[in-house]
């Protein structure tokens, strides 16, 4: 493709194969029309949307069996959106969102690769506002807390787009900002629980710091 190189990979998740077009590597940058710059995507972080991360794989596996009946679901910061594809194959009411200008293009290509119906996508920066996005019963995401300001930005975004009774699931590899995020979520009325979620580290070895953060809020 013009400006960057891609590859097609196959992931076996929950008994099914998913074909994924992803960036060939993380050392790429292409912004010929300035759309990434206008969206606030720095050159160093430009390729991060386009690869499948260990936390994303772990969340996709979790979503193979997580209860979804009757729930409107949002994958926040979807990147390559593997979790959304898994949920779509299960027939979920799933919307994907990201702020990277190429996220939707990659998502819809991967939807077609896997013979899935069109999947709703919304460009949604965390600072917002995003009036077209709406509110959801279940919000999921992976590896979202990797900068000091992400805890506040993410909690604020969730506060604007979660239903009064809702659940939030974050697959976190242990980058260090989960505690601050949990404190902010408690202020929104959420009760936190965690479970271990081992993930691969940067050299592909298991890392025990991974965890699934679950935040639950009742309507009252």
Image (cartoon, helix red, strand yellow):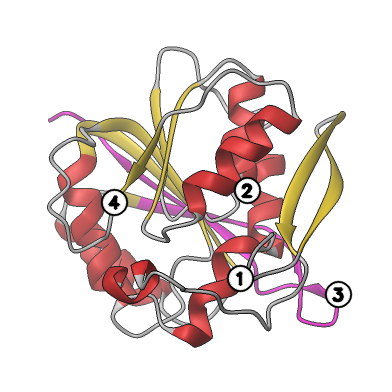
Within-10-Å neighbours for mark 2: few <14, some 14–19, many 20+: many
When the figure is inspected, residue 94 is found, relative to residue 209, above or below; the finding is: above
First in sequence, mark 1 or 2: give its number: 2
Residue position for label 3: 204
169 vs 82, left or right, is left
Q: Residue at x 57, y 36 (%)?
A: 108
Q: Which mark is residue 124?
A: 4
Queried whether the magenta region covers residue 123, the answer comes back as: no
First in sequence, mark 2 or 3: give its number: 2
When the figure is inspected, residue 114 is found, relative to residue 212, above or below; the finding is: above
Front residue (pair 13, 98): 98
- Alpha carbons under labels 2 and 3: distance apart: 17 Å
Q: How many marks?
A: 4
First in sequence, mark 4 or 2: give its number: 2
First in sequence, mark 3 or 4: give its number: 4
Front residue (pair 121, 179): 121
Magenta range is: 192-220
Q: Which mark is residue 76?
A: none
Q: Residue at x 35, y 67 (%)?
A: 35
When the figure is inspected, residue 171 is found, relative to residue 113, above or below; the finding is: below
Residue position for label 2: 59
């Amino acid at each position: 493709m013009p400006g960057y190189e891609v590859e097609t990979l196959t992931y076996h998740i929950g008994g099914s194969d998913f074909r994924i077009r992803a960036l060939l590597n993380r050392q790429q940058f292409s912004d010929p029309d300035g759309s990434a710059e206008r969206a606030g995507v720095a050159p160093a972080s430009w390729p991060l949307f386009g690869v499948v991360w260990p936390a994303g794989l772990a969340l996709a596996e979790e979503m193979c069996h997580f209860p979804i009946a009757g729930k409107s679901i949002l994958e926040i910061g979807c990147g390559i959106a593997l979790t959304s594809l898994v949920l779509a194959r299960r027939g979920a009411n799933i919307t994907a969102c990201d702020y990277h200008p190429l996220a939707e293009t990659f998502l819809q290509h991967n939807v077609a690769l896997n013979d899935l119906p069109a999947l709703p996508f919304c460009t949604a920066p965390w600072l917002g506002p995003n009036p077209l996005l709406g509110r959801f019963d279940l919000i999921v995401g992976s590896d979202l807390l990797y900068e000091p300001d992400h805890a506040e930005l993410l909690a604020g975004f969730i506060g604007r787009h979660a239903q009064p009774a809702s659940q939030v699931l974050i697959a976190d590899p242990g980058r260090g900002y989960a505690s601050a995020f949990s404190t902010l979520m408690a202020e929104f009325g959420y009760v936190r629980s965690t479970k271990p979620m081992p993930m691969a580290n940067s050299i592909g070895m298991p890392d025990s710091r991974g965890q699934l953060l679950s935040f639950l809020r009742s309507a009252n």
